[in-house]
Image (spheres, rainbow, N blue to C red):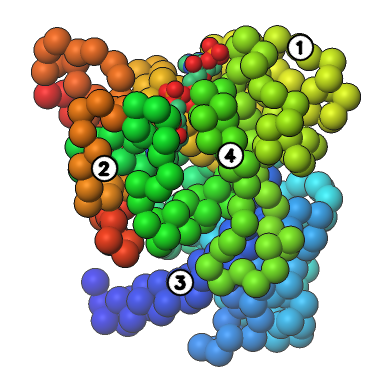
Amino acid sequence: MSELKQDSIQSDQVWMQRAIALARLGQYSTKPNPNVGCVIIKEGQLVGEGFHPKAGQPHAEVFAMRQAGEQAKGATAYVTLEPCAHYGRTPPCAKGLVAAGVTKVIVACPDPNPLVAGKGVQILKDAGIDVEVGICQAEAHQLNQGFLKAMASGMPYVRLKVASSLDGRTAMASGESKWITGTEARQDVQHWRAISGVVITGIETVLADDCQLNVRQLKGVDDISTIVQPKRLVLDRQGRLALNAKILQQPETVMVMGPFRQELADLGVLQFEVQPLKDLLQTLSTQHQIYDVLVEAGATLSTAFLQQQLVDEMISYVAPTFLGQTARAMFNAEFDRMAEQLRFKLIDLTQLGEDVRLRLIPSQETV
Ligand SMILES: NC(=O)c1ccc[n+]([C@@H]2O[C@H](COP(=O)([O-])OP(=O)(O)OC[C@H]3O[C@@H](n4cnc5c(N)ncnc54)[C@H](OP(=O)(O)O)[C@@H]3O)[C@@H](O)[C@H]2O)c1
């Protein structure tokens, strides 16, 4: 490869990294819309930049084009996700870029949304704009794991959070579980909740902990009211959720799967009939635009998600402590043979205070 070509790829990556950093500014507020960032570069200088802040507000490209104005003519636009091709709450960005006069568009991730899927790129190419797709694609994909999976498959991206001791225990036999991990790990959980459309839990966790599962504090966010809170979904097949449970203090953001209860409907709680977990996930994605799911439950429900192979990623916090064999295990399936084990692949390992966080994805390898 020539040195000139190498230099240009490197500078493309630098500008795309900036667009990715901008996209991340919307990570807690854009859902159900994706996080998108855009920069416009003319003769090596940044002339416009923007990100999508919230559903209903302009897309990243619009902010960048407004800032660039006349300087967009002959410039290169870097966008983290393929520009949209459809009239939604805002007009199509691909047409906007054509009208602005950019001569080159570099896209990190194609958009599998059937309303876009290649059509954004086609509009640009038809107008004679030079288009490149795939610069920093893996990193840009991380920004919108749920959105991209849901658009391609109709299923949300499911993260399972577990906090355990060194001996893999998640609560004492009595149900007492406060606190196994330290403040930094618990603070980190707030981030995963905040990027999720819903936090799913089992009724036994609500009965034991009277938890709320909302976002109360986020690193780098001064005003928590600026974020879009995740819904909280309690799986309660026998209708045992008490009306004075703390989680019902904000009933409009609570969902319950269980037998229909008029008193919950009166509070404004959205109810789902009892159904298999896979169907429930599909309903959340296709009918409620919930693309990122965080499961924060005890061993019973966590095991059900794992055994039904519905977990895309496990976020496992491990505290340097032993809770002993009468404490509850994190996984309660019974296996007899090594061949039955559920194996994961480590994708990230981070120390948080005294604890460690492992991010794991199901391993494709057979043992
Ligand atoms: N360390 C951690 O990360 C962590 C996180 C959360 C909770 N916990 C602890 O875990 C303990 C509770 O654990 P748990 O295992 O008893 O409760 P759980 O997993 O939170 O809830 C289990 C209940 O969920 C209901 N459920 C609904 N649909 C289900 C499905 N498809 N599959 C399985 N269950 C379904 C079942 O009750 P019905 O049959 O009545 O519907 C089941 O008994 C608490 O002590 C809590 O503090 C620890």
Q: Amino acid at mark 3?
A: Gln
| Mark 4 CB near ligand 1 (8 Å cut) | yes
The picture places residue 293, in percent across and down from the top left corner, at 54, 37
Q: Counting other residues with Cα less than 10 Å from the Cα at mark 4, is it few (<14), some (14-19), or many (20 or more)?
A: some
Q: Counting other residues with Cα less than 10 Å from the Cα at mark 3, is it few (<14), some (14-19), or many (20 or more)?
A: many
When asked about the image quadrant of residue 10, the answer is bottom left
Q: Amino acid at mark 4?
A: Cys
For mark 2, what is the residue? 165
Q: Amino acid at mark 1?
A: Phe
The picture places residue 44, in percent across and down from the top left corner, at 51, 88
Q: Is 46 above or below relative to 104?
A: below
> Which circle, 3 or 4, is nearer the viewer?
4
For mark 1, what is the residue? 260
> Which circle, 1 or 4, is nearer the viewer?
4
The label number, if any, that marks residue 211 in the structure image: 4
Q: Residue at x 62, y 41 (%)?
A: 212
When asked about the image quadrant of residue 75, the answer is bottom right
Q: Residue at x 57, y 81 (%)?
A: 41
> Which circle, 3 or 1, is nearer the viewer?
1
For mark 3, what is the residue? 17
The picture places residue 238, in percent across and down from the top left corner, at 62, 10
Label 3 to label 1: alpha-carbon separation:
48 Å
Residue at the extreme front? 174
